[in-house]
Image (tube, rainbow, N blue to C red):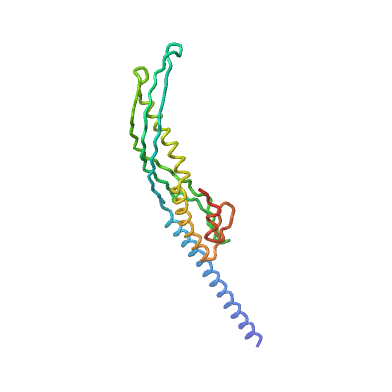
Amino acid sequence: MRNFLLGALIAVLSVIAIRYFIDRHQTQKIELESSDLILDQIKNVGKLVVTEGHFSEVITYKDAKKFYLDMLTAEKKAIVVVNAEVTVSYDLRKVKHKIDNKSKKLTIIEIPQAEIKINPDIKYHNLEEDFFNQFTPEDHNLIRKKVVEQLNKKVENSSLSANANNRLISELQKIYILTNSLDWTLEYNNTAIDSQTGLEEIIKY
């Protein structure tokens, strides 16, 4: 009788041990599958998000040089008309992240800054120059520099940047939706994201 009970006890313990290892293996498998799904989603959004726009600018350029003890002045001036194609993009392939399977947490470490590219078409009107103060390649380079600086300010304060930022958030929200459905935590900038709108609150363009 004692041997029978001992055998039954060993059998029960064996079943429990086997179930434990099977459950543990299945849990680990599910966790690995979850992290693989998250990695796949990150790769899917890891692309170049581009928003395009058109801007125009009119600049009056003036330059004066004085000669003979400042008694004579040689001036040059021009009206510069600029039409520019502008793109604001986020290269999401540069998103840095860390996955913690144990705590089921995805941490976004770094999101790339927006890249603004300006392709200006510059045309000169009413160009006037003095014999002693003529337009040079340096003037054209300076004009182009001023044009790009002014257009950069326009773009940063325009709806183009806002639209690009909205597209960025839309792509990152796909990651949140997946992590949330898998019962994972998404974290960015030391803040846990607890809703789709949470990303909008912490990501500023």
Residue 119 lies in quadrant: top left
Q: Position of residue 148 (x, y in %)?
A: 42, 36
Q: How many marks?
A: 0
Q: Position of residue 33 (x, y in %)?
A: 48, 65
Q: Position of residue 55 (x, y in %)?
A: 39, 42
Residue at 38 percent of width and 29 percent of height: 141
Q: Nearer the viewer, residue 50 or 108?
A: 50
Residue 23 lies in quadrant: bottom right
Residue placed furthest toward the right? 2
Residue at 51 percent of width and 62 percent of height: 179
Residue placed furthest toward the top? 68
Q: Nearer the viewer, residue 26 or 58?
A: 58
Residue at 49 percent of width and 59 percent of height: 173
Residue 101 lies in quadrant: bottom right
Q: Position of residue 15 (x, y in %)?
A: 57, 78
Residue placed furthest toward the bottom? 1
Q: Quadrant of the N terminus?
A: bottom right
- Residue 141 vs 37, above or below: the answer is above
Q: Nearer the viewer, residue 90 or 164?
A: 164
Horizontal arrangement in the rendering, residue 8 relative to residue 115 (left or right):
right
Residue at 46 percent of width and 58 percent of height: 39
- Residue 197 vs 68, above or below: the answer is below
